[in-house]
Amino acid sequence: MIRTRFAPSPTGYLHIGSLRTALFDYLFAKNCAGTFVLRIEDTDRERYVPDAVEKMVATLAEFGLNPDEGLTLENGSITEKGDFGPYVQSKRLEIYKEHAKRLVADGKAYYCFCDAERLDSVRKDQVERNLPPRYDGHCRALPPDEVKGQLSAGKPFVIRQKVPRTGVTEYWDLVYGRLQFKNDLLDDAILMKSDGYPVYNFANVVDDHLMEITHVFRGEEFLSSTPKHVLLYQAFGWTPPNFSHLPLILDTRRQKLSKRSGDVAVEQYVGKGYLKEAILNFVALLGWNPKTSEEIFSLGDLIKEFSLEKINKAGAIFDVVKLDYINREWKRKLSLTPAQDPMFALAKSMLESKCGRSIDSDKLEIIWSQINERIKGPSVLETEIGEFAFYFQDVTYDADLLSWKNAAKPATASNLRLIRDFLAALDIKSFSPQDLEAKIKEYLREKGVGFGEALWPLRVALSGQKNSPSPFEIISAMEKIEPGLFFKKIDKAIGLLELNG
């Protein structure tokens, strides 16, 4: 039976890289009819965030990645299910202490009584001599009587792993192949801290074995620490799970994705208006290549297509432009109404802030197709939504902007007046933008007026901008938002040309 686990530390909200790990764990388990386990590794008490566990479990559920075992969300409440619990490490402290003592008894680990002052001195000396800073093994071979005496005296201690000084440790990675590490470059890492809590490396190994995890997915940054894990498995006489290290997620400058690069928490992307389906689809492609031209995958599609052979070694570029594209494709695929689109409420709030007034949702719906066509995604929504403020407020612009190729202002005003009079004779609401375009252009041909000479000032009069939806789309939408509004804007432009002519 295939068993994978996602084991986050509750030190903050779920990050993009963590979501990818959880997704790959889930996809592999489901593709193989296996079990996906959620375990919480909360032994780093200094960085523990009280509500992080609840948010992580809820986020996984929202993305359809509810675990089969461990911590799951059922009927709005977190429950623990499975035969290998507890699934929260802070509830398993006695298990770790028992296994650490076993290693000490077998000569595979040892008590270390070095205080912080001595360790700092050793580290400073190593740095000054250009040596890699690591524990110098001072307590590695203490006589048993001295160890017993120190323990009896209640002296604080940690338990360290006794790493072999010679030879190599090797393991097979399902992504990177065979990897070897010289043992003399490895540190005698701490297994149990003086506060009685295990470190990540130790608890991770003990739990993966006891929970019968068969496959471990984690980031490439853990490649160098895995030899210590392998040595622990060997020290216990256990068979290691299969390791698959995933490529780093890089920003567009090819640096590791971090808070400096921008948003990294999944919650931030949901808050920006991205669809969960799009986020999950995008994250799946960060280091996994379907080997086809297809890029839009549902969770069900991903389960069918996923395989370890399609995981890349090269760093995965987090390109928000690609995320915007996938989000647009998912919006088309789902045929969302404005009310169903997470961007809609955000756009409404941003426009209201820009215009300094309340905007009716039904009026915003009238131009929602224009917004979706011109604004490529949530990443640029805040910076570009202001381009549509002209529908809901008066805008100012320079009179020179109205003239096509520096045409004389009186001539431009005359062309605008010509179009205004023509529009006044039409029932605008009975025409589509396409029909309106055909009629206006036909009229301009009859009058011998060039399209640019008349339609450029018309666009600017309506929007106050060089770039905007077509004047035909604007007129059609404005008449639905506020009947006669486009006449007011044209009249204002004519007055501005006359004033500055």
Image (cartoon, helix red, strand yellow):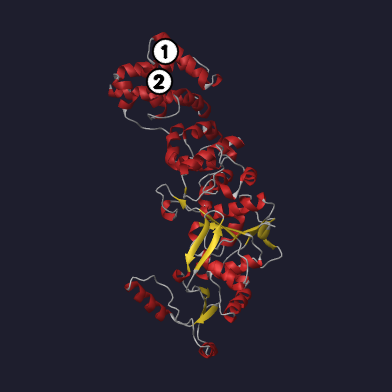
Tag 1 near tag 2, CB within 8 Å: yes
Rendered residue at 38%/13% (across/down): 449
Rendered residue at 62%/42% (across/down): 298
> Mark 2 or mark 1, which is nearer the start of the sequence?
1
Evaluate whether residue 497 shows in this view.
yes
Q: Quadrant of the N terminus?
A: bottom right
What residue did someone put label 2 on? 455
Evaluate whether residue 358 shows in this view.
no
- The residue nearer to you, when weighing 363 against 67, is 67
Tell me the crowding category of disc 2: few under 14, some 14 to 19, or many 20 or more residues within 10 angstroms, Cα based. Answer: many
Label 1: which secondary element: helix
- The residue nearer to you, when weighing 237 against 394, is 237
Q: Is residue 354 left or right of residue 17?
A: left
Vertical arrangement, residue 185 with respect to residue 109, above or below? above
What residue did someone put label 1 on? 444
Rendered residue at 43%/38% (across/down): 384
Q: Is residue 486 left or right of residue 99?
A: left
